[in-house]
Image: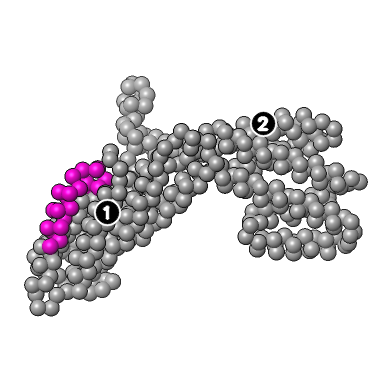
Amino acid sequence: MARPEEPPQTPAEPAGRGDASADGPEGVIGSLTPQAMEGARVAKRGVQRALPLFRVAIAVRTAVAAMVAWLIGSQTGGEFDNYAYAAPLGAFVAVGTTVFTIGRTALQQAIGMAGGAVLGLLMIRLDWNGILEIGLIGLIAVLLQGVPRFSQGATVVPVVAVLVILFGGANPDRYAIGYVGQFALGMAVGVIVNALVLPALYDKETRVSIRRAVDDLAHRVDVLADTMHGQWPPERQDWADWGPELRGVVEQLDHQVLEAREARRFNVRMLWNRHDLTVDERALTALRAVVHRMEDVLDAVASTAWEHPMGIDIEQDERQLAADAVAALAAHIHAWHDRGDIAAASAASNEAIDRLYNSVISVEQPQSGLASVVFALRAIRERIDWAASQEPEA
């Protein structure tokens, strides 16, 4: 049976934080049309996405670091303060999401700048033709990019080398030392400011994101169960393509957990923060396994409706039993998210899966597709039970 075309749908906007009537005087809000209120909410969400709090915090720390670097750089004395403008530039470079990554990047940049200054001074000493000098600088810079530990430091090598050649003047050594020294000073100030001014940990945000993903998965499984209980083949078809979306969510959470792990390194807030990130890592491991098996369920159920990606025939009674098993599994996932009665939800899910299994094996030639659904549902149920057992007491 061919999979029907579905009319294009407008993606639903995420729920706002509250009614617009709570955001201002009653008289003003009451005069707004529903379209204007919705536009205001969309604009607010757009601003929040473009300027999240963590980015505002990074911007403030960068501004403070640049000002401090300028003050220190301009008070160094002698001819060194002639290059004080490079200090805030270094502070601007020392920007990132974690103390460890900022410090590592700053160190790589400092090494790269020193290497670029040496390379520029070497070109001046050799006094080659300008074309040859530029060619050699480009050659060395690209080769250094292939050194894993050099990483981002290689990108500044050609820049500093050319600056020394162009602006070094009669005393290129002084220019190289002054510029690189002030720039390194600014990066050091940036690292210190980012390390001391309440550096982010991202641990609580990571846990909230994982729990939100579990809740979203539970609601999706609810939709799948309702769809299977309804007319067949169903008119709604977006659920059949949820697999890549769910994988994308897990990949994003993987990155978020890694960032939270990195944020803990050399972070002064760890002295009083007792967040156990391993709990989140175990929850993500379980969620990854659940999503993997849920893709098998989605593919099999879609095949019973549209014979794609594989052809599976299913009787109405079996489909209703499968829908009951999926609905029981959704309740199990909800219990995992809400920290409800996991044992009761697991037992109900197991009973519904067993009913489907007994129906599948009762026929002379069981459908392999339905058998795969039974296996996937059981694997999901067991993974949820494991994940719930690993969580600390509320």
What type is the residue that disc 1 sits on?
Trp
Give the answer, above or below, for where 240 lies relative to 330. Answer: below
Total numbered badges shown on the rendered structure:
2
In the image: residue 283, left or right of residue 300: right
103, 24: nearer the viewer: 103
Residue drawn at (72%, 60%), measured in percent from left and top?
141
Looking at the picture, how far across and down is residue 387, in whole percent? 29, 51
Look at the image and give the residue range highlighted in magenta: 334-354
- In what quadrant of the picture does the N terminus appear? bottom left
Badge 1 crowding class, 10 Å Cα cut-off, few under 14, some 14 to 19, many 20 or more, is some
73, 59: nearer the viewer: 73
Marks 1 and 2: CB-CB under 8 Å? Answer: no
Residue 353 magenta-drawn?
yes
Determine which residue is flagged by label 2.
67
Badge 2 crowding class, 10 Å Cα cut-off, few under 14, some 14 to 19, many 20 or more, is some
Looking at the picture, how far across and down is residue 193, in whole percent? 60, 34
221, 350: nearer the viewer: 350
- In what quadrant of the picture does the C terminus appear? top left
Give the answer, above or below, for where 282 lies relative to 200. Answer: below
Residue drawn at (59%, 44%), measured in percent from left and top?
102
